[in-house]
């Protein structure tokens, strides 16, 4: 190998969404005091890079775009074993949607690539706060790297021949793809079982200061960053619409009576009754039945 | 990316962008039904905007898919038929769909929020530099002149819905969760005009090759397609409880599902999970046993036609969603219910397949 291969892992610091509560009156988020964590889907992405480090001695760089405190997520990556970490932070990046995010990350990756050519970028399949899964593919497209998403197994990689072979999961199949480096992978959680942070790495992480880049030294056009550079905007947020019916509570002296009344209610439901009375010729026609009719109180 | 301009400062009227498009997703000749669900919903949007509803069909020898798209409501079909498109791969599909967008300018483009739809939509939105809303569960449009797509999606662990707009770029793109919208009626024999476009790529241009494709009989898919689901949650208290649920499911001709609590407890595999991190389902009958009704579960099954809940706790949130509720110990209720269904159905499934 002419040079040490370079694997970059894109990560994000996210609010622990399980802790977020909604104010039932206003329908707004109560975010104060919510702890931040390294996006759980990013941990197996990092692990996959660290396995390449174990096998091939690759250099592993973690990168994130975020506010200054996102440094903590990068320190976490160093604790797991990342060699270096880059924090892309600038006020102009605030409020970015996925298109503006991939713009900024793309510029930073180009800068990183110029310093040490990138062979592979690995991302988690999505974040737990945005849940879009759009940033990995967006980066791949902007970089012109091969886009390989929902990877469940990295079967083979050859940094000299510039080839990679992965297994990818879809809703109905498992595909084996062969492609070329450089590539961007997004990985599913099932790809591996992440390691624990080692003690020396933990110690290194506590003192570790990431490389900090801003809009200027990554040559960003401020008009394409953050809220300004985002084609999508949130126009409003609201609590999910209330249910439109009453639940019929079934109670009776003995369980047989209860059970029979449940059976009655099921058989009497308009949608079920209609389907039972007029069994359609083809499965498709049955699916075509209007599904709206809700239960009694609707 | 040359010529990228500021998305929030343009003030175009986009008069040349018209029409609602749905990307028809398929693998090995089989359509993912989310595409037809989107034609059903797209029809409503097109009607409000007074424009045509179009299907984009990319693939190799896709005539049968084109016919089906018309039967499920497309007014016209944009077709890219090329051997290179035999299997889904990002690069050629992105190239084909982006070329169609540039040539024929839809104002709205909808795709399924599936592994293929998300992969493709992300690449296309980056290529044409437009806004993309992921995982939408509600769609609407503002009437002309604004014509804006109102794409609403759950956020922050499903606790809140957010409506996303894309004002200054076209098309307005969204991926939509399967089973969010009902299947439209199928009109056999319905046809319309087809516009063919060339792909403009050859196999030599594409670095990624599909070496193997193994169809997996995912249980999750069976779950998603089922008409009757009997699901268990934390209230089961024990993996053995699923045996009871299986018997009830069998008596109904249905399948078994689970809440995240049951999966996390290790009682049943993740494939059975209904809800935010599992499958979204839309059966005719959903029986929730020992499921309290965390919002993350409810969003995955609230579109079921009829919901029956069995829970010890009368204040469990599941009862707010259910149509019929039984407060009681599921270990006592379920066997009796199974017997009652067996007797009344005479050994036949509740709904014939």
Image (cartoon, coloured by chain):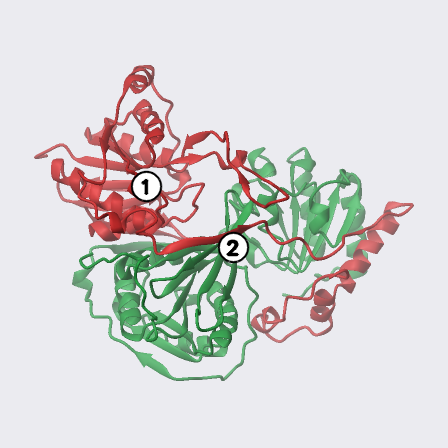
Chain colours: A red, B green
Residue B96 visible? The answer is: yes
Residue B179 located left or right of residue B311:
left
Mark 2–mark 1 Cα distance, whole angstroms, equals: 26 Å
- For disc 1, the marked residue is A123
Q: Residue furthest right?
A: A253
Q: Verify CB contact (< 8 Å) between mark 2 and mark 1.
A: no
Q: From the image, which quarter does the N terminus of chain A lie in?
A: top left
Q: Position of residue A229 (x, y in %)?
A: 30, 52
Q: Which residue is located at x 68 percent, y 33 percent? A: B237
Q: Which is nearer the eye, B162 or B321? A: B162
Q: Which residue is mark 2?
A: B221
User: In terms of image quadrants, where is residue B348?
Assistant: bottom right
Say which of A64 and B150 sits in front: B150
Q: Is residue B256 left or right of residue A90?
A: right
| Above or below, comparing residue A26 to residue B198 in the picture | above
Local SS, label 1: strand
**Circle 1 residues within 10 Å: few <14, some 14–19, many ≥20:** many
Point out residue B191 in the picture as x, y percentages from the top left corner: 45, 84
The image shows residue A149 at horizontal and vertical percentages of 33, 49
Nearer-the-camera pick, A137 or B139: B139
Q: Output the chain of dot 1.
A: A
In the rendered image, residue A50, in percent from the top left (x then y), is placed at 28, 30
């Amino acid at each position: 190998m002419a040079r040490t291969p370079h694997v970059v892992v894109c990560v994000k610091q996210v609010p622990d969404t399980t802790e977020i509560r909604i104010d039932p009156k206003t329908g707004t988020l109560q975010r104060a005091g919510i702890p931040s964590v390294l996006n759980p889907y990013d941990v197996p992405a990092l692990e996959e890079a660290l396995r390449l480090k174990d096998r091939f001695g690759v250099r592993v760089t973690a990168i994130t775009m975020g506010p200054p405190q996102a440094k903590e997520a990068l320190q976490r990556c160093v604790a797991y074993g990342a060699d270096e970490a880059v924090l892309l932070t600038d006020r102009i990046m605030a409020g970015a949607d996925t298109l503006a995010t991939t713009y900024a990350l793309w510029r930073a990756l180009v800068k990183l690539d110029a310093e040490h050519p990138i062979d592979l970028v690995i991302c988690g399949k999505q974040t737990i706060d945005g849940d879009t899964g759009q940033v990995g593919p967006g980066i791949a497209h902007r970089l012109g790297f091969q886009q390989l998403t929902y990877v469940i197994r990295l079967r083979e990689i050859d940094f000299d021949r510039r080839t990679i072979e992965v297994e990818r999961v879809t809703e109905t199949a498992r595909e084996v793809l062969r492609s070329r480096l450089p590539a961007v992978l997004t990985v599913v959680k099932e790809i591996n079982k992440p390691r624990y942070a080692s003690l020396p790495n933990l110690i290194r992480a506590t003192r570790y200061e990431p490389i900090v880049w801003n809009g200027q030294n990554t040559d960003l056009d401020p008009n394409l960053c953050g809220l300004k550079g985002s084609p999508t905007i949130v126009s409003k947020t609201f609590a999910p619409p209330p249910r439109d019916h009453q639940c019929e509570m079934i109670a009776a002296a003995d369980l047989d009576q209860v059970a029979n009344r449940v059976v009655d209610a099921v058989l009497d439901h308009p949608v079920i009754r209609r389907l039972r009375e007029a069994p359609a010729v083809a499965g498709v026609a049955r699916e075509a039945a209007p599904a709206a009719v809700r239960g009694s109180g609707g | 990316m040359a010529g990228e301009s500021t998305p929030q400062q343009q003030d175009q009227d986009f008069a040349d962008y018209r029409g609602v498009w749905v990307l028809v997703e398929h693998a090995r000749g089989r359509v993912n039904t989310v595409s037809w669900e989107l034609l059903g919903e797209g029809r409503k949007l097109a009607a409000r905007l007074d424009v045509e509803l179009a299907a984009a069909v990319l693939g190799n020898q896709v005539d049968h898919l084109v016919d089906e798209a018309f039967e499920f409501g497309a007014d016209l079909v944009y077709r890219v038929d090329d051997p290179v498109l035999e299997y889904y791969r990002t690069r050629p599909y992105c190239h084909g769909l982006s070329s169609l967008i540039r040539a024929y300018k839809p104002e709205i483009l909808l795709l399924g929020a599936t592994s293929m739809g998300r992969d493709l939509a992300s690449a296309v939105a980056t290529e044409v530099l437009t806004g993309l809303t992921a995982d939408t569960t509600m769609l609407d449009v503002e009437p002309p002149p604004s014509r804006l797509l109102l794409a609403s999606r759950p956020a922050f662990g499903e606790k809140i819905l957010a409506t996303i707009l894309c004002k200054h770029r076209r098309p307005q793109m969204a991926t939509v969760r399967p089973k969010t919208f009902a299947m439209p009626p199928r009109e056999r024999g319905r046809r319309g005009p087809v516009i063919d476009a060339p792909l403009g790529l050859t196999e030599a241009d594409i670095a990624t090759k599909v070496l193997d494709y193994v169809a997996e009989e995912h249980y999750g898919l069976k779950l998603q397609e089922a008409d009757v689901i009997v699901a268990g949650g934390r209230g089961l208290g024990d993996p053995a409880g699923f045996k009871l649920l299986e018997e009830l499911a069998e008596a109904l001709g249905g399948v078994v599902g689970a809440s995240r609590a049951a999966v996390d407890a290790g009682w049943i595999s993740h494939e059975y999970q209904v809800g935010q991190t599992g499958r979204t389902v839309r059966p005719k009958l959903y029986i929730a046993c020992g499921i309290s009704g965390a919002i993350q579960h409810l969003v995955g099954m609230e579109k079921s036609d009829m919901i029956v809940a069995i829970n010890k706790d009368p204040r469990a949130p599941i009862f707010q969603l259910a149509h019929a509720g039984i407060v009681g110990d599921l270990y006592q209720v379920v066997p009796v219910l199974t017997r009652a269904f067996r007797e009344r159905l005479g050994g036949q499934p509740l709904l014939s397949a």
